[in-house]
Image (tube, rainbow, N blue to C red):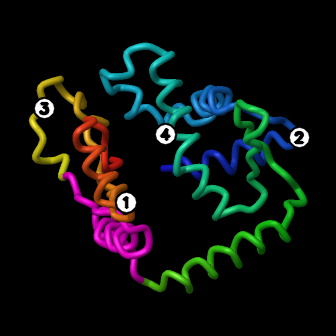
Amino acid sequence: MTSRPQMIIETLKSNKGTKFTARELAKLFIERYSSALADKRTNPRYDTDDKFIAQLAAEIGGERTVRAKQQCPNVVTRDKPRTRLYYWDDAPQTEELEDVDIDRKDAQSCVGSTSFSEHDLYPMLVEFLNKDMGLNCQRIDERRSINSQGSGGNHWLHPDIVAMEPLDQSWDETVRTCVRHGNDKSIRL
């Protein structure tokens, strides 16, 4: 069975000089690899041709193109102007690829082999904001939130971290009293 990255490579190689959108590539896949896609086509979620083509186009636009580019440097995408185009380049820009590899290696050496999840970074961010910016921070755990809006309803309801900046630390006591009696704010959220 031919993998999606192989399908991308073979289809673009056989159509040198032609630029395709993901949707056009998906249609070519259906023509060229109908037997390899037969199992996927029987899925009831793809009951119409448009749904099936949209799924293949989404697969092309995702990680599979990245893998195809890694396997074969002749596979090229053009992202700007909008509508990503996929095509075969007989003489790919190897200098750019080398620069990207060097940048990637530099980034890995800076970070090391340790990878951090988003939640691992929160304590570091809180410490930075506290020490360097003088902010009082609190982590909000969105998983403990009550979801009253249905599936995904509270997705953007809570920020991950909230910081409070005390404005009145350098104020004279008289000014603080005036602000309190005037119902003004002495902190910024």
In this view, the mark in front (2 or 4): 2
Q: Quadrant of residue 171?
A: bottom left
Distance CA(mark 1)–CA(mark 2): 69 Å
Tag 1: amino acid: Trp
Q: Secondary structure at mark 1?
A: loop
Q: Earlier in the sequence, mark 2 or mark 4?
A: 2
Tag 2: amino acid: Gly
Which residue, given by chain and number where applicable, does mark 1 sit on?
171
Q: Please state the horizontal and vertical placement of residue 63, each as a whole percent of the image.
A: 52, 51
Which residue, given by chain and number where applicable, does mark 4 sit on?
36
Q: Secondary structure at mark 3?
A: loop
Tag 4: amino acid: Ala
The residue most toward the top is 48
Q: Quadrant of residue 172?
A: bottom left
Q: Nearer the viewer, residue 130 or 84?
A: 130
Image: magenta residue range: 114-140
Callout 4 crowding tier (Cα within 10 Å): few <14, some 14–19, many ≥20: some
* Disc number for residue 147: 3
Callout 2 crowding tier (Cα within 10 Å): few <14, some 14–19, many ≥20: few
Q: Secondary structure at mark 2?
A: loop
Is residue 149 a member of the stretch shown in magenta? no
Q: Please state the horizontal and vertical placement of residue 42, each as a whole percent of the image.
A: 35, 26
Q: Please state the horizontal and vertical placement of residue 183, each as a whole percent of the image.
A: 25, 35
Q: Earlier in the sequence, mark 1 or mark 4?
A: 4
- What residue is drawn where x is 23% and y is 58%? 139
Q: Please state the horizontal and vertical placement of residue 147, each as a whole percent of the image.
A: 13, 32
* Disc number for residue 35: none
